[in-house]
Image: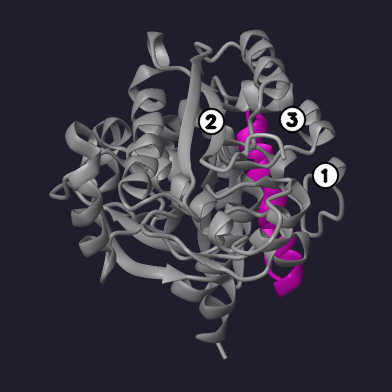
Amino acid sequence: MKGITDKEIIVANSAPVSGPYIASGDPLNAGIKAYFDMINAQGGIDGRKIRFLHQDDGNDPKRSREILEYFLKKEVFAYIGHYGPQVVSYTLKRIRDSHMPVIYFFTAISDLYNEHAKTPEDGRNCFPIQTIYITEGTVLAARAVSNFHASSIGVIYSDDDTGRDLMIGIRKQCTALSLACCARCQNIDCYDVEETVAHVLSHNVDAVIIASSQAAFVPIALELARQNNKRPALTNYVNMNITKSLQIFDAVLGQYPLYAPSWVDYQDGRMEKLEDASEWLGDYAMNTYAHCGWMAGYVFCEGMKRLSGKEPTWENFTDAMEEAPFELPFGGKIDFANGVRLGAQEMTLYELNRHAPIGWKQIDGLRSIQELLQTQK
């Protein structure tokens, strides 16, 4: 089988480990390599050591496609950690046509979303772990109902792929719950944000969702405060960072509560797993991107372990990946059974907090939509 010998399992990827994207690409790769180093130190999988090949693509789609073609011609069993929305969008059809398994995509684009992939051409050979925006949209709507007892929500979504994908998930969940939803699209330059916010608030909704890319998030959050919003608001996890927090603390805190979910979690026994991982992660021991790479390596290796005694083919590997859920080291369960390709569905909840290290404080643990809605019954 391609990429499998008696002594080795050969995997690869391309990711930016230089240039402007090094801050995320390099630790992501470091996390993948660190997990494989640990497994190899333990003797590998069924006596096979993992060899991880990599080339720097600078986040350039054309370069990434060239590298993909190169590795497809080489003896490579799988891609681990495919980086970036532009790159993934540009190469995804080729990946599906090749039938090569890909584990972990560093993006949340809707092209990865599939509720029942039956063939590689549908994406059955693709295993997204990071939460996909459509999935997160369903979680945001469910959180509005579960945490804030909303019977109606207002949504301001950015006029780009991020906002539109989130809106698909929000509408899906609102339909399932018969939840009233007033949605308004916001141009990403936010020149008319005052009108957009006024329109949504005029519907007297119970909660507001800011479903947006980072570029539009701050102006929307500030305008909600300026218009004296008192309702709880939620936003998507890409906006949960200290850079954005510093821009909104003074206006938002004390005016209205602001929340965001996350699919990465370090509570309970996961902190012990982080301590164990830190021995291998070195300088990236506390880097979330490296932890994502670590989880990518973990899921791949656990899938390979399920092949013990079976021929290590792509088809058998895909079947093995679907046979049972995975318990992510720094997250919840993820289940690929029956072609489900939604990314992580269990998410935590954070609240904007000036005194927290990242500007957000975790207030609730990992919950699936089913768990969230069960509390309402």
Disc sitting over residue 193 in the figure: 2
Horizontal side of residue 222 vs 192, given as left or right: left
Residue 267 is covered by the magenta coloring:
no
Q: Secondary structure at mark 2?
A: helix
Crowd around label 1: few <14 · some 14–19 · many ≥20 (10 Å): many
Q: Secondary structure at mark 3?
A: helix
- Residue 301 in the image: state x and y as whole percent: 50, 52
Return the residue nearer the eye: 41 or 321.
41
In the image, residue 67 above or below residue 337: above
Return the residue nearer the eye: 242 or 195.
242
- The outermost residue toward the left is 355
CA distance separating discs 2 and 3: 35 Å
- Residue 221 in the image: state x and y as whole percent: 41, 40
Q: Quadrant of the C terminus?
A: bottom right
From the image, tell me which residue sits under label 1.
Answer: 120
At label 1, the amino acid type is Pro
